[in-house]
Amino acid sequence: MANRKEVLQPVHLLRIWMHENMRVFGDRLIENKEVTWLSDFIADRCQAKFAISTKELFNTPRLIFGDFYEGKDVETRVYK
């Protein structure tokens, strides 16, 4: 659902990837320590493979993506 016109830098794609992993896998975890482990693991992989720091990856306290920011009645709903 990501639009290549909106994903301008590698860190933008990694944020979407992080968000999707946390929704698909993280939402199924029960304990907070498991969620923290998953988040740390993904951030570590971003650092190791793409040289993106945790601080750069998490530019906000929580990564949230959706296609509703422009409203639901727009012609093209952009996932951002």
Image (cartoon, rainbow, N blue to C red):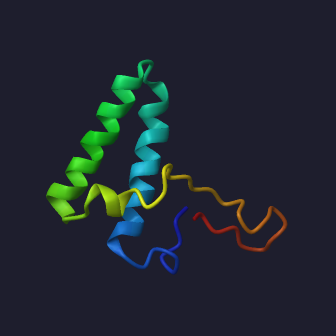
Query: Can you say which quadrant of the picture contains the C terminus?
Result: bottom right
Considering every residue shown, the one lying at the far top of the view is 30
Image: 3 above or below 22? below
Question: How many callouts does the rendering have?
Answer: 0
Residue at x 43%, y 61% (from the top left corner): 59
Q: Depth check: 23 or 33 in front?
A: 33
Q: Tell me the quarter of the picture where residue 34 sits.
A: top left
Quarter of the figure that contains the N terminus? bottom right
Residue 6 versus residue 24 in the image, above or below: below
- Write the residue at 41% across / 43% down: 21
Q: Residue at x 29, y 55 (%)?
A: 54
Q: Position of residue 51 (x, y in %)?
A: 19, 65
**Residue 63, horizontal then vertical, whole percent:** 50, 52
Residue 79 position in % (x across, y down): 59, 63
In the rendered structure, the answer to whether residue 7 lies left or right of residue 42 reads right
39 vs 76, left or right, is left
The residue nearer to you, when weighing 10 against 74, is: 10
Q: Classify residue 26 by image quadrant.
A: top left
Residue 12 picture quarter: bottom left
Residue 35, horizontal then vertical, whole percent: 39, 30
Q: Is residue 5 above or below residue 14?
A: below
Residue at 20% x, 64% y is 50
Question: Farthest residue toward the right?
Answer: 73
